Image: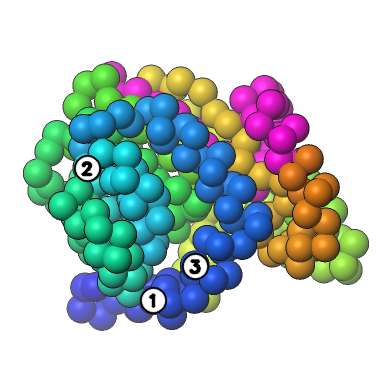
Amino acid sequence: MTAGALPSPFEALAASYDGTFTSSRIGTRMRRAVWRRLDAAFVPPSRVLELGCGTGEDAVHLAKRGVFVLATDAAEGMVAEARAKVERAGVADRVTTRALDAARLDEIHLEGPFDGAFSNFGALNCVPELAAVSAGLSRHVRPGGRVLLCLMGRYVPWEWGWYLAHGNRKAAFRRLVRGGAEWRGLHVGYPSLRELHRLFSPGFRFLGARAIGVLVPPSYVEEWAARHPRLLAALDAVERRVEALPPFPSLADHVLVELERR
């Protein structure tokens, strides 16, 4: 953290994140959907860069498959949780953890080039200028390398319906506010799929996009999901069949964008 910078709200969430999301019914299903694509993109012994590693769940998964990961996060508390998880999993020889602000990716020297890169579950929504991320990834990923970015979407019918049914119009349409929203002192942006295509097209070829949470509800609906496990499973099964079909990626809680370095 640079001098004078405000502490990331994720510092306070690091210790509880796995309990509230990673091990939840909804979080587990969403992560498995992302893992299917990560596994297809990164084969052993690839070396990949992770932006916004959180508690290290994805890095450990890939390392167990023989992939080498440089797992980074702007929140030092998350990095500490990730490092501990990596050590418990016995994959410290394949995962290196580092505190790194993705907004400065284009300025920082890394031991590359990497065979690919990824970011999961909205870490990049908290980066003010994604153009800097695009430029940084262009620097650090080799030509032909795959990049998978999972960001929070802008248009989420599940969210509209849920919050309107509970009388909270402001929360229902918070992602549509021009310029993004403020959360715990952090600015959060919700770029559309078209904007993501434009921002990353200088260095990357667009391979496709997949819906992560278009039929499966957002994570704050966990109590409902716990009461309806069979319905949740059915929604997940249908979502996996239609995840790549328009317009579903543009209407999901998260969108997984797949790119190839030019």
Q: Is 225 rendered above or below residue 9?
A: above
Q: In the drawing, does residue 192 fall left or right of residue 98? A: right
The residue at which mark 2 appears reads as 68
* Amino acid type for the residue under numbered disc 3: Asp
Q: CA distance from mark 2 to mark 3?
A: 22 Å
Q: In the drawing, does residue 69 fall left or right of residue 129? A: left
- Contact flag, marks 2 and 1 (Cβ < 8 Å): no
Span of residues in magenta:
235-262
Figure quadrant of the C terminus: top left
190 within the magenta span: no
* Amino acid type for the residue under numbered disc 1: Glu
Query: What residue sits 74% from the left and 45% below the top?
Result: 233
Q: CA distance from mark 3 to mark 1?
A: 13 Å
Q: Earlier in the sequence, mark 2 or mark 3?
A: 3
Q: Earlier in the sequence, mark 3 or mark 1?
A: 1
Q: Is 44 rendered above or below residue 77?
A: above
Q: CA distance from mark 2 to mark 1?
A: 25 Å
The kind of secondary structure element at disc 1 is helix
Q: Earlier in the sequence, mark 2 or mark 1?
A: 1
The residue at which mark 3 appears reads as 18
Provide residue 190's location: percent of width, then percent of height: 56, 49
Q: Is residue 249 visible?
A: no
Query: What residue sits 70% from the left and 26% below the top?
Result: 242
The kind of secondary structure element at disc 3 is helix
Provide residue 141's location: percent of width, then percent of height: 22, 32
Label 1: how many Cα within 10 Å (few below 14, some 14–19, many 20+): some
Q: In the drawing, does residue 166 fall left or right of residue 250? A: right
* Amino acid type for the residue under numbered disc 2: Phe
Query: What residue sits 87% from the left and 67% below the top?
Result: 166
Say which of 23 and 165 sits in front: 23
Label 2: how many Cα within 10 Å (few below 14, some 14–19, many 20+): many
